Image (tube, coloured by chain):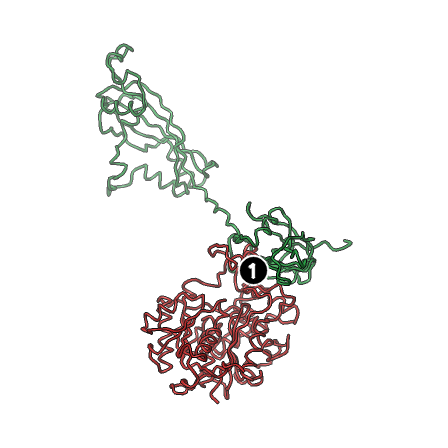
Chain colours: A red, B green
Amino acid sequence: MSVLPGAAAIAGIGATEFSKDSGRSELRLACEAVLAAVTDAGLQPSDVDGMVTFTADTSAEIHIARNLGLGELTFFSRVGHGGGAACATVQQAAMAVATGVADVVVCYRAFNERSGTRYGLGQADRPMDVSADRAAYSWMTPSGLATPAQWVAMFARRYMHEYGATSEDFGRIAVVDRRRAATNPAAWFYGRPITLEDHQASRWIAEPLRLLDCCQESDGGQALVVVSAERARDLPHPPALIWGAAQGSGNDQHMMTSYYRSEITGIPEMGLVGRQLYAQSRLTPADVQAAVLYDHFTPLVLPQLEELGFCARGEAKDFVADGNLELGGRLPFNTHGGQLGEAYLHGMNGIAEGVRLVRGTSVNQPGDVHNVLVTAGTGVPTSGLVLGADM
Amino acid sequence: MTDYETRLQSWAGRELMAPRFGQDAVNVPMIRHWVEAMADDNPVYLDEEAARASGRDGIVAPASMMQGWTMRGYAASVRPAPEPASEPSAADELNGLLAEGGYTSVVATDSEFEFHRELVPGDRVSVEETVESISPEKKTALGAGRFISTVRTYRDANGEVVATQRWRTLRFRPKEKPEPKALRPRPAINQDNAFWFDAAREHRLVIQRCAECKSLRHPPGPCCPQCGSFEWDTVEASGEGHVHTYVVNHHPRHPAFEYPLVVAVIELAEGTRLIANMTGVAPADVEIGMPVVVDWIDPDPDLSLPAFRPAEKKGA
C-alpha cells in the first residue's frame, strides 16, 4: 500500500481572527496565521522548510519566508481550483514529509475576501484575456450566469427535481452550521443561531438559493503545520494523523459548471476523493465519527454525504432531516459552524476544526471522535482528508 | 398661477443691473486690438483721413465693441471680488429664484442691437439692464427651461442712449444624461471558440463535431475527448431541445440584464447541452423538461446569443 497513510500529521494550527475588514494586508494575515500555527506546533519559524498554498493566494511563500525569517525552503508548491485546493495543500505537505523532501511544511491561506476582492460578486466584470480558463467563462457570463451562487443553483434545481429535495432541506444545513457557530467564540456568527423559518424568509439570491443558503465572505488567514507522524509525537499536541489525503478531478470536469455530464445531481470528483480516502485509511464511512464538509452553498452538502457513502443517493435530505448531523447524531458536522457560520477561509478553517476534533478540543466536541473526514470545495476539482487520532 | 410663477413674473420690468460705467473710455489702442483680432480692415476705425472721407468727424469705434466697453475685464472674471456683506444683487436674487425651479444651467440664445450713434475715442459708456419678460416653461433639446429676455441700455457720459440690446438667455433644467447602456460581459474569444460566436452573429447555432469519429461536443475544444482527433467541423443544430435545469437570478445585479433573470442549461435534440437565457416565458413558468426552440437575441451590435423559448405545443 501507499507510504502516505499515517506517515504525516498535522501538529499545529493557527489563524487570525475572522472578520469582515481585517484592516491589514493579506501578507500580514498570512504571516500571523503561519506564525501562530508554528507556535502551536511548538516549533520555531526556522524549523519550517516547506510551504504550500493555493494558486489563488496573493502572498507567495517567499514573502512569508522572508518576513518570518523561515530561512531556506526545500519544498514549495501551489494548488489550483479555488476552494478545491484546501485539503490538497495538506496532501502535498504530507507527500513531501513522507518522501523526505521536507520536514516541516506549512499550509496556509490568507485573504481579505470580504473587504477586498469578493468572489461572490462573480466573474462578469473580471479583466479579459483569452486563456483557456478565461474562455471557459464565455459559455456563461454573456448570458448573465456569473457568480458561484448562480452556478451552484443550477445543480441544486436539478437535484430537487430528481430527488424531491426542497428549499427546507437545504435550509437544515444552514441551521446546523449556524447552531454550531452560535457557541463558537471564533465564529463570525457567534451567538446568532437561525431557525428554518429564518432561512425560508430570507430573500432569493439565485433561485432555488436563498440568502441563508450562501456562505458569508470573510477576511482572515489560517495555517497548518505538517510534520512526520514520528516528529509529531514529540510535539505538544496530540497529533492529527493524516490517514487519507486525496485529490479528485472527475470526467468532463469544469470549474463550477460541470453541467455537461449525463447526470448532474452527484459530485463525481468528490466520490473519487472519497474512494481514495477510504482505500488509503482502510476505513469505511462507519468508522468516521465526525465530518467537516465544504459548505460554500448548502445544496452541495447533500450530494457530498451521498458521494462519501454516509447515505444512499438521493437520501441525504432524509439523513439530514433525521438529525444525523447534530452533535449527538450519527455524523456530527461542521462543529466550528462551517463557512456559513464561522468564516469563509476557502476550507482551511475546516481542516483546523478537523484537527481540534481529533485533539478533542473543539468548542462543540462530540464524544468519542477517532476519525474525521474533511472535504474541500465542491463543484471544482477538489480534495479531502481523513484525520485520525494516534493509535 | 402658482406662487412660483407669480414670483417669477413679478420680475418683468424690474431693474436687474443699475447703470455702471465701463473701466476705460473708448480708446484707439483697444480699437486696434479688436480690429486686428477680428481682421476687420475697414479704415474708418484707425485712419482719421479715411474716416473723414466717409463723412465722419474722425475715427469711430466698431459698433460690435459696444458691449466690450462695459465689460468688467479679465481680472473680474477670474478673481471675482469678495461678495459684499450687504444684501445680494438683483441678479443673484433672480438666479436664486431660477435655481429654486431647477433652472440651474444657462445658454445665451439671442442678442439684438439697435445703435443710436457711433462711439468715438473719449466716450465713456455705461450700461444698465432691465428684465423684459420671462417665458413659460418650454421644452427644448437641452431640457425644460425658460427664456429670460432683458433690455440693456448703453448711454454716453451725458446720459444719451447710444445703443440698446435685447438679450435673451435660456435658463434650463439640465436633462438627466442617460447612462450609456451597459454591455453584457464579453465572451473571451480565442482560436478554440471563435467559430461558435461567429456563427451566432449570423444566428446559426452550430455544434462542434469531430471530423474523425463524428461525435458532437459542447463547449468546444481543440481535441476530441472520444478519439483524440484534432480535426473538427461543425453541424447546424435543429434548434430544438428541452430545459435540463435552470436558475432565476436575483442578486447581484449586472446592469446589462433585467431581473429576475432566467438562465437555463438546454439539452439540444442532438444531445449536447449549452447555457442560455430564456425568452417568452415568465420565470415562474419555467420547468425542467420543458420543450424549447432557439430564439436569437442581439443584446448589442457585437453580440448575438442563442436563447430559447417554449416550443409550440404539437397540434395546438
Can I make out residue A325 in this image? Answer: yes
**x and y, in percent, of residue A94 in the image:** 46, 78
Asked whether A114 or B15 is in front, the reply is A114
Q: Is residue B89 left or right of residue B262?
A: left
**x and y, in percent, of residue B115 in the image:** 33, 20
Can I make out residue B157 in this image? Answer: no
Asked whether B112 or B315 is in front, the reply is B315
**x and y, in percent, of residue A282 in the image:** 56, 84
Q: Is residue A138 left or right of residue A361?
A: right
Mark 1 nearby-residue class (10 Å; few <14, some 14–19, many ≥20): many
Please name the amino acid that badge 1 sits on.
Asn
Q: Is residue B99 left or right of residue A317?
A: left
Image: B75 above or below A206 = above
Asked whether A59 or B2 is in front, the reply is A59
Kindly identify which residue carries mark 1.
B249
Image: B49 above or below B99 = above
Q: Secondary structure at mark 1?
A: strand
Image: A337 above or below B194 = below
**x and y, in percent, of residue B36 in the image:** 28, 23
Q: Is residue B311 left or right of residue A27?
A: right
Please, which chain is the residue tagged with disc 1 on?
B
